[in-house]
Amino acid sequence: MESWLILSSGPFGAIVGRVANRICGAAFTLNGTRYELVANDGKNMIHGGPRGFSRVIWKVKRHEQESANPSIQFSYHSFDDEGGFPGDILVTVMYTLTGNKQLIVTMKAMALNKPTPVNLAQHAFWNVGGHNSSDVLYHYIQIFGPVSHQWIASLYQQVRLHQ
């Protein structure tokens, strides 16, 4: 298991955090205190750093197999200064399969003793054609939301400036 945690090439299918995506310059200020994080993307931190949530062992908290909506819940206790982040947090993730053939992922995080940033993400990759289909190179998805191409480009440029 330890070799997988070290050698795995990416967070495919995993929960990423403590903070998903990048923190420019691998540092932030919260309530007047500057926190230095462990960089793992040039000078930036991505997906919680080299020991982010995709690289830790989660505990099975509970599971229901014999239900109309089978589910499994995992938990992880992240301690103060893990990756450079302040405070302990308790994170739970529940996966539920519904009778309507839906997968519901419910993620929760609770700060236990200090204010701290948390931004979890499910880093799943889906082949919408099904497991017997070909690769995903020609799949398209359209998501309607308040994000503009200009905002994404400017965010990318800001991160690149810190490398």
Image (cartoon, rainbow, N blue to C red):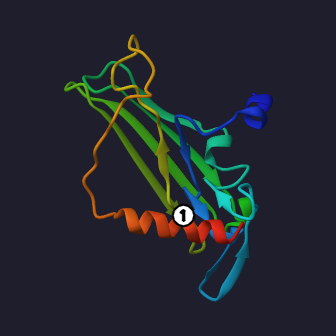
Residue 81 picture location, percent across and down? 73, 65
Q: Callout 1: helix, strand or loop?
A: helix
Residue 86 can be seen in this image: no
Of residues 103 and 112, the one drawn nearer to the viewer in this rendering: 103
Q: Is residue 103 above or below residue 163?
A: above
Percent of width and height locating residue 69: 28, 27
Give x and y (percent) for residue 47.
61, 53
132 and 73: which is toward the camera: 132
Q: Is residue 146 left or right of residue 158?
A: left
> Going by the picture, which residue comes out furthest to the top?
132
Query: In which image quadrant can residue 9 be found?
Result: top right
Quarter holding the C terminus?
bottom right
Q: Residue at x 43, y 26 (%)?
A: 136
Horizontal side of 122 relative to 34 (left or right) equals left
Quadrant of residue 31 in the image? Answer: bottom right
Residue pointed to by mark 1: 156
Report crowding for label 1: few under 14, some 14 to 19, many 20 or more residues within 10 A (C-alpha). Answer: few
**Left or right relative to 92: residue 5:** right
Residue at 73% x, 35% y is 5
Asked if 114 appears above or below 10 in the picture, the reply is below
Q: Is residue 3 above or below residue 109?
A: above
| Quarter of the picture holding the N terminus | top right
Q: Residue at x 39, y 10 (%)?
A: 132
Identify residue type, mark 1. Answer: Tyr
Q: Who's the residue at 33% across and 18% down the image?
A: 66
One can see residue 10 in this view = yes
Q: Residue furthest left?
A: 100
Q: Nearer the viewer, residue 138 or 106?
A: 138
